Amino acid sequence: MSKTQTALVIGGGIAGPVAATALLKAGIDARVYEAYPGASYNIGSGLALAPNGIAALDVIGAGDAVRDIALPVSKMGMSIGGKSMFLPGLEGMPPLQLVDRGELHQVLHNHAVAAGVGFEYNKRLVDVVEDESGITARFTDGSTATADVLIGADGIRSTVRDLIDPNAPGPDYTGMLGFGAIIDYDGDVEPESMTFAFGKQAYYLYGAHGPGRVMWGANLPHDEYLSLTAARAIPKAHWLGILRETYADDTPGGEFARRTTEADLEVSGALHIMPPVPHWFRGRMVLVGDSVHAPSNSSGQGASLAIESAVQVARCLRDLPTPTAAFEAYERLRRSRVEAVAARAAKTNHSKTLGPVGRTMMKLLAPAFMKMMNVEKSMGHEQRYRIDWDAPAQKELAVTV
């Protein structure tokens, strides 16, 4: 029987509210501590939730609320040199769900509050004190909070990760900045589609966003690292000028850039990828979400994997007798899966920054590659994954041995 009765969740983005809600479902009292002064609804732009991510949200009863704010994406394609090719879908799989990150934050926050999760703001973690009876978090405002365990859901610049292992690697910069916009566009874009386009100078993606509307996102090569704050401090007119120049000769990317206004443009800053983290937990602390695994945006799985891990850590704490046993089980269930996705995404990420010769070769070889691609083999194991909440975590562990 589990000895864990209370939990501190550090971070109120995506993984934090999901973890806290799942912990409550597991019979563990959880409270979220967020560094920002309020719920963060305006960070980031659009993201896609894969079927496995939505299924994990169904475990805590939040799946339908997210579907209500999402647009289905049932067709995935690739465009090289202006020529588009659509991939066959996975048989029997529901579509991906395209959501605004801010709206997703709000839905998950509201769902957690409705479930009974408490939130505290302006709580920036600086240190912890741990003993046999529990763990106490210390915040910059001088306050403290104590519980049986502490869940680090504090993002890619995680303080909890550094407390677990001061030598832990930090995120790697991909060499690209992220931008997004939803614009008016009367061109030909397939309904319920998402196209990954390799332009003459840079990568972008786009998809239908209702009648006469398109969502598009740019991955702009940029030597200098710029955080979200630094990138947003630069006038949007500057970024629009660069985007319009970069995509000028691309179809339809050039038109997307020309139609994007300053009001439309969402600046996301540097795009990151997390290298493998050696230590996922120490004592009564454990990591979930981007703090421990953040594949590049090429994966299409970042948010979905974060949601899965948030649910699984709660399940393991429910089913294993001690925090150490629970965290060991959680890592065994998660590490190989998330690192396999990250490895796949890293290969895709490399193709976004190919030079002129590489882009020419891709244009020549892509049609044959698309015909030969086994979608089930490459994506089936990722999207068909489901968490059996009602089954003891030990049962799944026995299968993974």
Image (cartoon, rainbow, N blue to C red):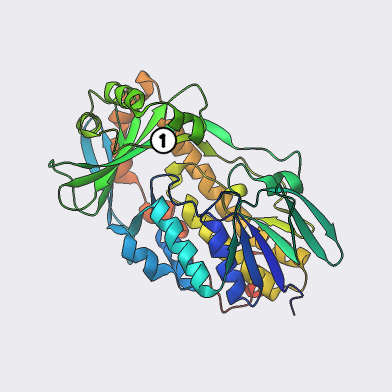
Q: Is residue 201 left or right of residue 306?
A: left
- Note whether 242 is above or below 72 in the view shown: above
Residue 117 visible in this rendered orientation of the protein:
yes
Q: Amino acid at mark 1?
A: Gly
- Mark 1 residue element: strand
Q: Nearer the viewer, residue 139 or 63?
A: 139
- The single residue placed furthest to the right in the displayed view is 132
Specify whether residue 49 is in view.
Answer: no
Residue 243, image x, y percentages: 31, 26
For the N terminus, the quadrant is bottom right
On screen, residue 395 versus residue 307, left or right, reads: right
Question: For residue 353, which quarter of the picture?
Answer: top left
Residue visible at 61% across and 58% down? 334
Q: Is residue 134 above or below residue 38?
A: below
Q: Is residue 76 above or below residue 196?
A: below
* Horizontal side of residue 376 vs 306, given as left or right: left
User: Which quarter of the image is occupied by the C terminus?
Assistant: bottom right
Location of residue 181 (image quadrant): top left
Count of numbered circles on the image:
1
> In front here: 240 or 286?
240
Q: Nearer the viewer, residue 181 or 54?
A: 181
Q: Position of residue 13 (x, y in %)?
A: 52, 54
Q: Percent x, y for residue 236?
A: 35, 29
Query: In the picture shown, does residue 359 fall above or below 345?
Result: above
> Which residue is at the front of the view, 28 or 317?
28
In the rendered image, residue 96, in percent from the top left (x then y), is placed at 35, 57
Q: Within 10 angstroms of label 1, few (less than 14), some, or many (20 or more) residues?
A: many
Task: Say which residue label 1 marks.
Answer: 178
